């Protein structure tokens, strides 16, 4: 089931209006199946990251930077799903995310 708006707000990386994207993203790892509800937002350049964003452990990318970034397949699916629902058709990943953890952080986790 989808999380409540209160739960989502508590974990949101930004205090901006979020728009739910209809449908879900599904991805199967070797040992479990994952279903994700996706929300998206227009983000102003001067936005302040909330603690839930863990700003010290991540970086935010512009739409122009996304096509060249190495992302896991599941995050490419999330990005494609979010962009299919909106006006931006510029990013077309090979498979179906806006927060990208630095690769060194993923290796140390």
Image (cartoon, helix red, strand yellow):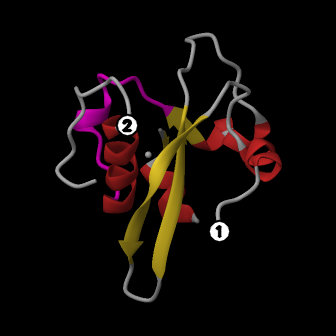
Q: In this view, does 22 lie above or below 108?
A: above
- How many numbered marks, from 0 up? 2
Question: Which numbered tag is attached to residue 85?
Answer: 2
Residue visible at 54% across and 56% down? 37
Residue stretch rendered in magenta on the structure: 60-72
CA neighbours of label 1 inside 10 A, class few (<14), some (14 to 19), many (20+): few
Q: Is residue 58 left or right of residue 61?
A: right
Q: Of helix, strand and loop, which one carries label 1?
A: loop
Residue visible at 20% across and 38% down? 92
Q: Is residue 10 left or right of residue 41?
A: right
Query: Is 63 within the magenta?
Result: yes
Taking depth in this image into account, of 50 and 108 the one nearest to the observer is: 50
Q: Which image quadrant: the C terminus?
A: bottom right
Q: Is residue 49 left or right of residue 35?
A: right
Q: Earlier in the sequence, mark 2 or mark 1?
A: 1
Residue on which disc 1 sits:
1
Taking depth in this image into account, of 102 and 39 the one nearest to the observer is: 39
Residue 88 coordinates in the image, percent (x, y): 31, 24
Q: Which image quadrant: the N terminus?
A: bottom right
Q: In this view, does 88 lie to the left or right of 10?
A: left
Query: Distance between the Cα atoms at labels 2 and 1?
Result: 21 Å
Most extreme residue toward the front is 22
Residue visible at 71% across and 20% down? 48
Instruction: From the image, give the main secondary structure of the stretch colored magenta.
Output: loop
Is residue 101 at least partly visible in the picture? no
Residue 94 coordinates in the image, percent (x, y): 17, 50
């Amino acid at each position: 089931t989808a999380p409540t708006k209160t739960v989502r707000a508590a974990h949101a990386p930004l205090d901006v209006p979020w728009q739910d994207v209809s449908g879900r993203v599904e991805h199967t790892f070797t040992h479990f199946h994952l279903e994700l509800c996706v929300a998206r937002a227009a983000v102003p350049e001067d936005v302040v990251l909330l603690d839930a964003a863990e700003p010290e452990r991540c970086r935010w990318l512009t739409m122009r930077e996304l096509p060249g970034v190495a992302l896991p397949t599941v995050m490419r699916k999330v990005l494609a799903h979010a962009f299919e629902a909106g006006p931006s058709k510029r990013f077309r990943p090979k498979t179906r995310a806006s927060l990208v953890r630095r690769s060194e952080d993923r290796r140390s986790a």
